[in-house]
Image: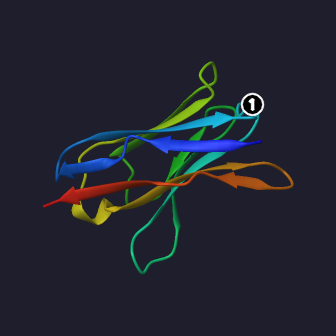
Amino acid sequence: QVQLVESGGGLVQAGGSLRLSCSASGIIASPYPVGWYRQAPGKQRDLVARITSGFVADYADSVKGRFTVSRDNGKNTVYLLMNSLKSEDTAVYYCNLKMPSTDYWGQGTQVTVSS
């Protein structure tokens, strides 16, 4: 059974940092791209950052220069380091592993940035 488990969310002041983790079990994640998405109340779920199997990363314009996505294949885990957090970064953050025929989602972790 494939599971993705996010952790590391919480409450932080504006300007602070958090590191989110997405740990995969039941699957070897290294051959697949993994994305971080976020969803604020009343809004759609949007892509924040993504990393390919070849460690190529891309980012939404709103987080470029502040967020860094990385992966540790030995730990089967993908990270999202979030610096200079803003109130508009408040959302539930989800990781997504995309396979050719299906994809998997974690349960999400809440990030709340207080101004």
Q: Nearer the viewer, residue 58 or 29?
A: 29
Q: Residue at x 31, y 62 (%)?
A: 90
User: Left or right: where does residue 101 sit relative to residue 1?
Assistant: right
Residue 113: image location, x then y, percent:
23, 57
Image coloring type: rainbow
Residue 12, percent from left and from top: 21, 49
Relative depth, front residue between 96 and 86: 96
- Asked if residue 11 lies left or right of residue 70, the reply is left
Query: Which residue of the protein is positioned furthest toward the right in this rendering?
Result: 101
Decide: few, some or many residues near mark 1? Use Cα within 10 Å; few <14, some 14-19, many ≥20. some
**Residue at the spot x=84%, y=51% of the render?**
100
On-image quarter of the C terminus: bottom left
Most extreme residue toward the front is 1
Q: Which percent across, then down, holds residue 45?
A: 52, 69
Find numbered disc 1 in the image and state the secondary structure of the residue it sits on: loop
The single residue placed furthest to the left in the displayed view is: 115
Residue at 27% over, 58% down: 112
On the rendered image, what quadrant is the N terminus found in? top right
**Could you tell whether 108 is left or right of 62 in the image?**
right
**Residue bearing the label numbered 1:** 28
Q: Quadrant of residue 76?
A: top right
**Amino acid type of the residue that numbered disc 1 sits on in the rendered structure:** Ile
The picture places residue 44, in percent across and down from the top left corner, at: 51, 75
Residue furthest to the top in view is: 74
The number of numbered discs placed on residues in the rendered structure image is 1
